[in-house]
Image: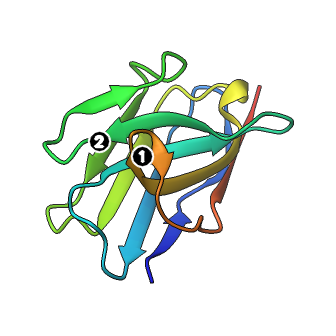
């Protein structure tokens, strides 16, 4: 049973930074990519950053140039460095393995990010 646990969220002012972490446990298929998702109030959960097994990274336009996804060498955790945060970045952030953009495992609790103007 794969478990995902996100951490690192908090409340910051616009322009601030946060670093999110996602720790995975259990046996995960190694060919899955990893991704960060964001769910803002009243909006569907959206993939905002993805890192492939060969470390190619892809970002949603809304976060490109401000967010950086990375993974630990052991590949059991990923991170999301978020800089120049904006109020519209507020929401609950989740990580998951993805295959063809579809999440593969049960969602973790997520971590709340609140950005005030």
Q: Is residue 93 left or right of residue 50?
A: right
Q: How is the image coloured?
A: rainbow
Q: Is residue 59 left or right of residue 85?
A: left
Q: Is residue 75 left or right of residue 17?
A: left
Tell me the element at label 2: strand
Q: Residue at x 48, y 23 (%)?
A: 60
Q: Residue at x 40, y 26 (%)?
A: 59
Q: Residue at x 29, y 41 (%)?
A: 51
Rendered position, 98 above or below 66: below
Identify the disc placed on residue 35: 1
CB atoms of marks 1 and 2 within 8 Å: yes
**Closer to the camera, 75 or 20?**
75
| Residue that label 2 marks | 51
Identify the disc placed on residue 116: none
Q: Is residue 106 left or right of residue 59?
A: right
The image quarter containing residue 111 is bottom right
Label 2, residues with CA under 10 Å away: few <14, some 14-19, many ≥20: many
Rendered position, 30 above or below 26: above
First reached walking from the N terminus: tag 1 or tag 2: 1
């Amino acid at each position: 049973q794969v478990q995902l646990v996100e951490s690192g969220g908090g409340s910051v002012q616009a322009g601030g930074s946060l670093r999110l972490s996602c720790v995975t446990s259990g046996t995960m298929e190694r060919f899955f990519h990893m991704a960060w998702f964001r769910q803002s109030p009243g909006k569907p959960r959206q993939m905002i950053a993805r890192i492939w097994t060969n470390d190619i990274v892809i970002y949603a336009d809304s976060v490109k140039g401000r967010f950086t996804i990375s993974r630990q060498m052991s590949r059991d955790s990923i991170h999301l460095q978020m800089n120049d945060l904006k109020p519209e970045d507020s929401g609950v952030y989740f990580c998951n393995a993805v295959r063809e953009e579809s999440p593969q495992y049960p969602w973790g609790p997520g971590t709340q990010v609140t950005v005030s103007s």
